[in-house]
Amino acid sequence: MRFVIIEDDLSVRKIMINIIEKYKLGTVVAECGDGWEAESIITEYAPDVALVDLLLPGQDGVELIRKLKETKIETSWIMISESTSQPMITKAYQTGIDFYIHKPINVLEIVSVIGKVEESRRLRQVMSLISQTTARYVGPGGRAVAPDDNTKKNRLNRVFSDLGIIGEAGVKNIHQLAQLVNLRLADGHSQSYQLHELYQELSQEIGQDVKTIEQRVRRAIAKAMQNVANMGIEDYHNDKFEMYSGALFDFKEIRQEMAFIQGKGSYRGKINIKKFLEGLLFLAAE
């Protein structure tokens, strides 16, 4: 991946460059320490990932990212700051950052977070690829049929097992919803489909109440989030935790769930059903 580092502390910039080079995470194509200069640099280089300090001379990191995201640039954002202010962190996430890292810099955290960003970017690429290629496999009635359904089903069952929800009532419905999402991706509707449409269609297919299906699905995914959060608490660098926390959930919500379980937060993490379903397809396609 191609990186740009925006940080007014030269020593911190050098540390991050050394980490990226030492662990072969990618190439740093540009760096600077000013918020105004950063705007033109990121626009020019269009990096895969920008590591941005919150407090910058000129304009702060939140404003910088907000303006650049309006240009539809496809850069992933990692914010780095000494600030532990929850309102400030929330504002940063609302602006559209992927991760927030606290100073002082922790090497393992930087490596882990960049790995999650790379996984997330690959997820988007694979979902785009699925939407372009699965349309080739069309069965009776215009419904897309994947050539390796059994393989994908086995892979999904392995994921459900890893997540500790293989026995949950909602798992069968999740699998059915994922198939419906796959059909929409095949038809090029990756951005436009709505969850309530999926619930309605599944309700008609299996003859069950929409609300019942939705409750079962939400309960199973919430259980999966809780189990993944517990994996992270036990071992933050657990391979399964690193994979599932980024592919199936919003990582900031996983962090919130971890804090809740540890008694450090008042609210549980929120699930994103669309992300979970599309993440399952990504994992099945790998």
Image (cartoon, rainbow, N blue to C red):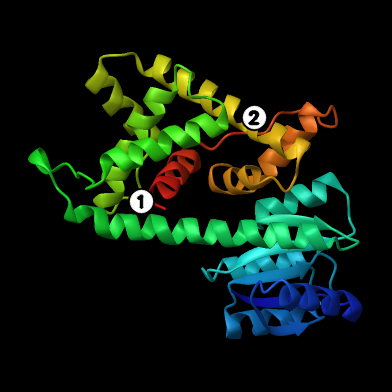
The answer to whether residue 145 shows anywhere in this view is: yes
Q: Which residue is rendered at x = 74% and y = 51% of the image?
A: 91
For residue 69, what is the image quadrant? bottom right
- How many numbered marks have been drawn onto this rendered protein structure? 2
Measure how far apart labels 1 and 2 are at the Cα level: 28 Å
Residue density around tag 2, few if under 14, some if 14–19, many if 20 or more, within 10 Å: some
Of residues 276 and 8, the one nearer the viewer is 276
Query: Mark 2 sits on what residue?
Result: 227
For residue 101, what is the image quadrant? bottom right
Q: Which residue type carries mark 2?
A: Asn
Of residues 123 and 62, the one nearer the viewer is 123
Residue 265 percent location from the top left of the image = 81, 31
Question: Mark number for residue 190?
Answer: 1
Residue density around tag 1, few if under 14, some if 14–19, many if 20 or more, within 10 Å: some
The answer to whether residue 96 shows anywhere in this view is: no
Residue 275 percent location from the top left of the image = 49, 43
Q: Secondary structure at mark 2?
A: helix
Residue 219 percent location from the top left of the image = 54, 21
Image quadrant in which the N terminus is located? bottom right
- Which residue is most to the left? 140
Q: Which residue is rendered at x = 49% and y = 36% of the image?
A: 159
Residue 245 percent location from the top left of the image = 62, 44
Q: Is residue 147 left or right of residue 277?
A: left
Q: Secondary structure at mark 1?
A: loop
For residue 14, what is the image quadrant? bottom right
Q: Which residue is rendered at x = 56% and y = 67% of the image?
A: 70
Q: Which residue is rendered at x = 12% and y = 43% of the image?
A: 139
- Up/down of 163 relative to 210, above or below: below
Q: Which residue type carries mark 1?
A: Ser
Of residues 60 and 191, the one nearer the viewer is 191
